[in-house]
Amino acid sequence: MGLFNRRPHAEMAVSRDPEITAAVGYGRTGAGQIGNFIFYQDGDARAKAVSIPTISRARDLIASMVGCLPLKFYRLQWNGTEMEKVYIAPRAWAARIDPTVTNNFILSWTFDDLYFFGRAFWHVTSRTQDGYPSAFTRLPAAMITTLDQAGPIWFGPSQEIMFNGFLLDPNDIVQMLSPIQGLLTQSPAAINTALKLQHAADRNASSALPAGVLKQTSGEPLSGQELADLAQRFNEARYSNQTAALSESLSYEATTATPDKMLLVESRQFQSLELSRVANIPPYLAGIAVGGYTYQNASMAKQDLYLFAAKNYIVCINEYLSSDNVLPHGTYVELDVESYLTDLVATQDEIVNVTVPTEPQPALANIGSN
C-alpha cells in the first residue's frame, strides 16, 4: 500500500516535452501553426500606422532602447533597512531567448506588440528538468484571438487563446499585458486624420501646377459629364506636360495656393504634434519644434526617452518574465537600464571633458569622425 500512497514529489524533476504538453486536450494543430512563418502577419492596421513618420519614429526609438538591454537575474534580500538586489547567475535562456533569433529581435518585436496591440505572447518551446522554460518564440499579437476577452482593454491573462484559428494551451504561453492601451485602438481618429492629410499632400504633390478652375467662356453649354471628361483630360495633359493648351472657349484660373499650403505643411505639423502625444514621446525626439521645451544634451534626451516612453514597457516585460510560470519563486529578471544610462552619462562626460589643443596635431586629426 505504501507504493500507492506515496506523494509524487519526484515528478517535479522529470523533464517535460512542451510539444506533447501543448497537444493534450488541444490538438496538435494549434501548436503546429507555430513557426509556420508563411502565415505570420502583423495586420493592416499596424502597417497603416507605421506609414506615418511620427509613429514610425516613436516606435523605432523605443524599440532601439528596449531591444539592446541585457538581462540580469537577482534575488531580493533584507539588509536591515531595505530590500536590496543580490544578483545571481542567469538561466541558460538569458543569452538567447529564442535560439533562432537574437535577443535584440525578440525583445524589440515584443515591445512592438505591447505598443500597438496592448499585449504580447511568447510560446514555450522547451523546458529544463525542473519544469521551467528554457526557450521561447514570439507569437504575433495580431494573430491572437482570446475567446474569453474581446478587448481592446485586457483585464487579465486569457485561458482560451486562439492562434491563427487554433486553440493553444495557456500553460505554454507567457502573456504580457501592457499597462497602456494599444496604440491602434487608443487613438484611431488621430491616426486616420494623419493618413488623410498624408494622402491629400501626396495628391497635391503629384502636380507641378497649383489647383484651379477650368471655365467655359463661350460656345454651347456642356453637360456635367462633358465637363467632367474635359477636366480629366486637362489634368492628364497638365500632369504630363508643364504647358497645357486650351481653346478660345475655355479659360483656366489657378488658385493662389502656395506650395506649403498645397502640401498642408502647417496641418501636418500640428498632426505630428498630436501623434507625439499619442505615441508618448517628447515632441523634440520626433523632430517637432515646441516652444519652451529644450534639452541640454544627448544624454538627457535618452533619459527622457526612458522616463516618458520606454519605462512602462520595460517594467512590464521585467515583471512578466519574473512570474512564477517562468522563473522559480523568489527569482527575478530585469532589463539592465542602469548600465545603459550610466554608459550614456560617462560617454557624455568624456565628450565634454575633451581638451581641444591650440594647434592641430596629427594624432587628433580624426577625432571628430570617431
Image (cartoon, rainbow, N blue to C red):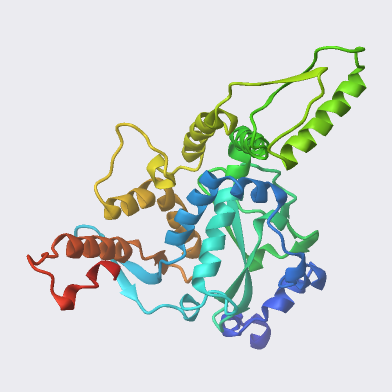
Direction left: furthest residue? 358
Direction front: furthest residue? 248
Residue located at (57% from left, 80% from top): 99
Q: Total label count?
A: 0
The quarter of the displayed image where residue 244 is located: top right
- Whether residue 348 is visible to the viewer of this picture, yes or no, is yes
Question: Is residue 305 found left or right of 147 in the rendered image?
Answer: left
What percent of the width, then of the height, locates residue 293? 31, 36
Question: Is residue 301 found left or right of 224 in the rendered image?
Answer: left
Instruction: Answer above or below: position of 159 versus 90.
Output: above
Instruction: Answer above or below: position of 261 versus 38.
Output: above
Question: Is residue 166 found left or right of 77 in the rendered image?
Answer: right
What percent of the width, then of the height, locates residue 206? 67, 40
What percent of the width, then of the height, locates residue 257? 58, 24
Give 193 or 198, whichever is nearer the viewer: 198
- Whether residue 316 is visible to the viewer of this picture, yes or no, is no
What percent of the width, then of the height, locates residue 194? 60, 36
Question: Is residue 348 found left or right of 265 in the rendered image?
Answer: left
Figure quadrant of the C terminus: bottom left
Residue located at (62% from left, 34% from top): 197
Residue located at (65% from left, 56% from top): 141
Residue located at (38% from left, 43% from top): 284
Give 364 or 224, whichever is nearer the viewer: 224
Figure quadrant of the N terminus: bottom right
The quarter of the displayed image where residue 84 is located: bottom left
The quarter of the displayed image where residue 155 is located: top right
